[in-house]
């Protein structure tokens, strides 16, 4: 008899700086990935370092955007251009982006 497998729960924190283009791109990329790859399994917290500098200082965030994967372990930090989906997928241990099957793929 197979034991029921509980899906992994994910916890991410995205630190941004206002409505800058890099922050906007990071939010868009991370939300799309959460909706597509981790739907129903994700807790995403977005922290604007301008509004909550104490939280950024406590987390030792020195640059934005920064995405912190809190769960599942290990904790990982991605800093910089988070508009690159492959970079974010790799950083979250989701693996490379899988191409859609073509007409000759059966």
Image (cartoon, rainbow, N blue to C red):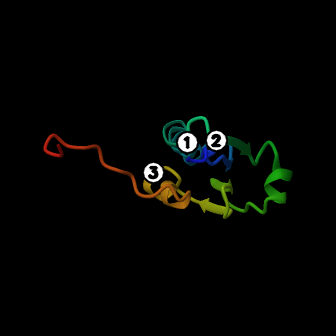
Q: Position of residue 80 (x, y in %)?
A: 57, 59
Q: Nearer the viewer, mark 3 or mark 2?
A: 2
88 relative to 27, above or below: below
Q: Residues within 10 Å of mark 2 (few under 14, many from 20)?
A: some
Task: State which tag comes first along the sequence, 3 or 2.
Answer: 2
Nearer to the camera, 78 or 37: 37
Where residue 39 sits: x, y (%)? 56, 36
- 59 displayed left or right of 77: right
Circles 3 and 2: CB distance less than 8 Å? no
The residue that disc 2 covers is 42
Q: Which mark is residue 28?
A: none
Regarding residue 16, the answer to whether it shows in the image is no
Compared with 41, 14 (above or below) is below
Q: Is residue 75 left or right of residue 99?
A: right
Residue at point 64% right, 63% down? Answer: 76
Q: Residue at x 70, y 42 (%)?
A: 46
Q: Could you tell me how far apart the alpha carbons at marks 3 and 1 are, in whole angstroms? A: 14 Å
Secondary element type, mark 1 = loop
Question: In what quadrant of the picture does the C terminus appear?
Answer: top left
Residue assigned mark 3:
85
Residue placed furthest toward the left: 104
Badge 1: few (under 14), some or many (20 or more) residues near its Cα, within 10 Å? some
Question: How far from the left and from the top, in percent, is residue 90?
Answer: 49, 60
5 versus 57 height, above or below: above
Q: Which numbered disc, 3 or 1, marks the residue closer to the eye?
A: 1
- Percent position (x, y) of residue 10? 65, 48
Query: Could you classify mark 3 by the number of other residues whose Cα lies within 10 Å: few (under 14), some (14-19), or many (20 or more)?
Result: some
Q: Which residue is mark 1?
A: 38
Element at label 3: helix
Q: Do the residues bearing badges 2 and 1 touch, measured as CB atoms within 8 Å?
A: yes
């Amino acid at each position: 008899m197979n034991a029921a497998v509980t899906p992994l729960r994910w916890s991410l924190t995205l630190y941004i700086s206002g409505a800058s283009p890099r922050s906007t791109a990071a939010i868009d990329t991370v939300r799309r990935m959460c909706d597509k790859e981790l739907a129903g399994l994700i807790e995403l917290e977005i922290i604007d370092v301008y509004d909550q500098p104490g939280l950024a200082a406590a987390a030792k965030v020195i640059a934005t955007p920064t995405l912190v994967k809190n769960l599942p372990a290990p904790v990982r930090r991605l800093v910089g251009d988070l508009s690159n989906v492959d970079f974010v997928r790799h950083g979250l241990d989701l693996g490379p982006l899988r191409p859609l099957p073509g007409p000759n793929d059966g």
